[in-house]
Image (tube, helix red, strand yellow):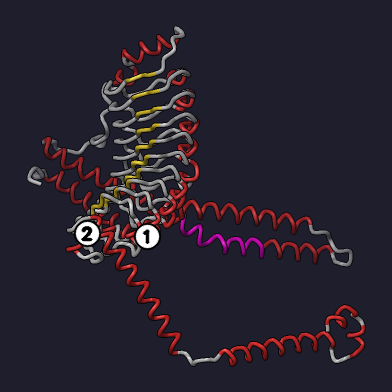
């Protein structure tokens, strides 16, 4: 850092570096952060435990007071039962509370780390600019002149005027208009089918967007959005949503209600997870682009996106895929490249994707392809560059995708044959038994069972036999 010569800046830099190092150390000590699905499950379990506890306590309270019981003793007994019930519930909650607490600690320290790193950047920027001191406000996003937020874009004003005159508007394109805010009045465009707000400086979208009841296409890419309004879930006719190139750390659960969605692009953001139920709701989705994020896992529900044809999750931090991925039988293209050291294997269920045509696994740490990889008969494009592949060997990989499929198919057949031979040898090693021996053994067991059953029924007395004329007839 050649520009860092000012003693005050050097001192500030040392403190900032210490903060970053300390925060990173704490995060390392905390270990792996629980995935979003595990946290959601923990919250659900806590709710269920609370509901069961309320029900049990209500039953205790409503238990009638025995007539022969002393009133005081009965109250003590009831209080003891309530306490035991509450303690049992607390013990059951402990593990789920621990999961949620660990996630919250990760969230807090990751935020602290982000702030400390930004402080480091501001200090160096101050050094480059030749400033003597680091202003508290330095590094905050420039909001521009005060009138900037108040000043309405001329094109926006014209559009709103047209709307007031009763003119039906179906398409609005305000891309690259330097918009810093979107007026609430935009929710009045009931006839709007397509809205393009890309490449602006929007930091928020108003809740009134829910009023665009006929909207089918919404482009919010290239803005400064850190979150989406929950009301976006009321756009029931929305088919195409592009929120790429923003600062989103999560997608609102409301997005799951946009069941008409066919194309969702949330790439180039800071997403660390997807909504747990996204797959159960977006069953019509055909294209899902979530590359260049910080996703560590995909929710199990993604296996319910039966219409999905393209899944792009390259440049993330994926540590694997859920087993449910095999249920995406219409999937044709998957890009799993550049998850680097995090992605070390594929689930066996990926071989159930019989319609798969393109698979990109480059820049990962995969050592072996799934045993039944040869089942992907429609696969015509495969990229496994920059992986420490052992199975199949490099010379086979160099021959192309068909050679890889042939090799994996032959390997699987050989494995099955070896297993059959092993089972055959084990069977031959067992003591030989003749048909007569097996039959005699079976007959002895049968007679023994029947004798025991009849003996138990008779109980050693003749009277019981006479008591059941039907059994007498059968005997």
Q: Is residue 350 or residue 53 the one in the foreground?
A: 350
Query: In x, y percent, where is residue 161?
Result: 40, 9
Q: In the image, is residue 469 above or below residue 58? A: below
Residue 94 is one of the magenta-drawn residues:
yes
Q: Is 415 above or below relative to 178?
A: below
Q: Are marks 2 and 1 in contact (CB under 8 Å)?
A: no
Residue 329 on the magenta segment: no
Question: Which labelled disc corresponds to residue 360?
Answer: none
Magenta residues: mostly which secondary structure? Answer: helix
Relative height, residue 202 to residue 331 (above, below): above
* Cα–Cα gap, marks 2 and 1: 16 Å
198 horizontally vs 2: left or right: right
Image height of 29 relative to 286, above or below: below
- The stretch of residues the image draws in magenta is 84-100
Q: Nearer the viewer, residue 384 or 185?
A: 384
Quarter occupied by residue 367? bottom left
Q: Look at the image and tell me in which quarter the C terminus lies.
A: bottom right
Residue extending farthest to the left is: 2
Q: Residues within 10 Å of mark 2 (few under 14, many from 20)?
A: some
- Which residue lies at the image location 36% right of the left edge and 74% below the top edge? 417
The percent coordinates of residue 104 (x first, y second) are 42, 52
- The residue indicated by pointer 1 is 347
Task: Determine if residue 157 is in view.
Answer: yes
Residue 115 x/y as whole percent: 29, 44
At 39% from the left edge and 47% from the top edge, which residue is drawn? Answer: 273
Q: Position of residue 21 (x, y in %)?
A: 24, 55
Q: Secondary structure at mark 1?
A: loop
Label 1 Cα neighbours within 10 Å, binned few <14 / some 14-19 / many ≥20: some
Do we see residue 33 in this rendering? no
The disc at residue 387 is: 2
């Amino acid at each position: 850092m050649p520009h860092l010569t000012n003693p005050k800046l050097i001192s500030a830099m040392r403190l900032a570096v210490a903060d970053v190092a300390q925060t990173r150390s704490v995060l390392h000590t905390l270990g792996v952060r629980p995935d979003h699905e595990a946290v959601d499950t923990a919250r659900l379990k806590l709710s269920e435990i609370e509901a069961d506890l309320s029900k049990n306590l209500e039953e205790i309270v409503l238990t009638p007071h025995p007539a022969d019981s002393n009133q005081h003793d009965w109250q003590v007994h009831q209080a003891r039962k309530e306490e035991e019930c509450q303690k049992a519930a607390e013990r059951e909650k402990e593990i789920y509370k621990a999961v949620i607490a660990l996630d919250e600690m990760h969230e807090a320290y990751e935020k602290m780390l982000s702030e400390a790193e930004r402080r480091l950047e501001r200090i160096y920027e101050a050094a480059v600019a030749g400033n003597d001191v680091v202003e508290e406000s330095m590094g905050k996003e420039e909001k521009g002149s005060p009138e900037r937020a108040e000043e309405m874009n001329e094109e926006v004003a014209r559009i709103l005027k047209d709307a007031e005159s009763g003119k039906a508007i179906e398409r609005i394109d305000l891309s690259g208009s330097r918009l810093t805010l979107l007026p609430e009045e935009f929710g009045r465009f009931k006839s709007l089918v397509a809205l393009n707000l890309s490449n602006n400086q929007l930091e928020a979208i108003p809740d009134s967007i829910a009023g665009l009841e006929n909207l089918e296409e919404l482009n919010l890419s290239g803005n400064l959005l850190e979150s989406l309004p929950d009301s976006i879930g009321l756009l029931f006719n929305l088919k195409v949503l592009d929120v790429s190139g923003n600062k989103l750390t999560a997608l609102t659960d409301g997005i799951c209600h946009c069941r008409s969605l066919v194309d969702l692009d949330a790439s180039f953001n800071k997403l660390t997870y997807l909504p747990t139920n996204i797959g159960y709701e977006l069953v019509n989705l055909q294209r899902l682009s979530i590359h260049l994020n910080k996703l560590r896992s995909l929710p199990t529900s993604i296996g319910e996106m039966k219409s999905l044809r393209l899944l792009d999750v390259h440049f993330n931090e994926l540590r694997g895929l859920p087993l449910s991925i095999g249920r995406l039988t219409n999937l044709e293209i998957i890009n799993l490249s550049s998850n680097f050291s995090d992605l070390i294997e594929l689930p066996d269920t990926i071989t159930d994707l019989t319609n798969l045509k393109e698979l990109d696994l480059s820049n990962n740490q995969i050592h072996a392809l799934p045993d039944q990889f040869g089942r992907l008969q429609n696969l015509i494009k495969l990229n496994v560059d920059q992986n420490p592949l052992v199975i199949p060997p490099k010379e086979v990989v160099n021959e192309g995708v068909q050679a890889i499929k042939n090799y994996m198919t032959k390997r699987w057949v050989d494995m099955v044959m070896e297993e059959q031979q092993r089972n055959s040898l084990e069977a031959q090693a067992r003591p030989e038994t003749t048909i007569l021996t097996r039959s005699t053994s079976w007959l002895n067991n049968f007679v023994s069972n029947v004798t025991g059953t009849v003996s138990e029924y008779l109980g050693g007395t003749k009277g019981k036999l006479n008591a059941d004329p039907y059994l007498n007839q059968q005997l």
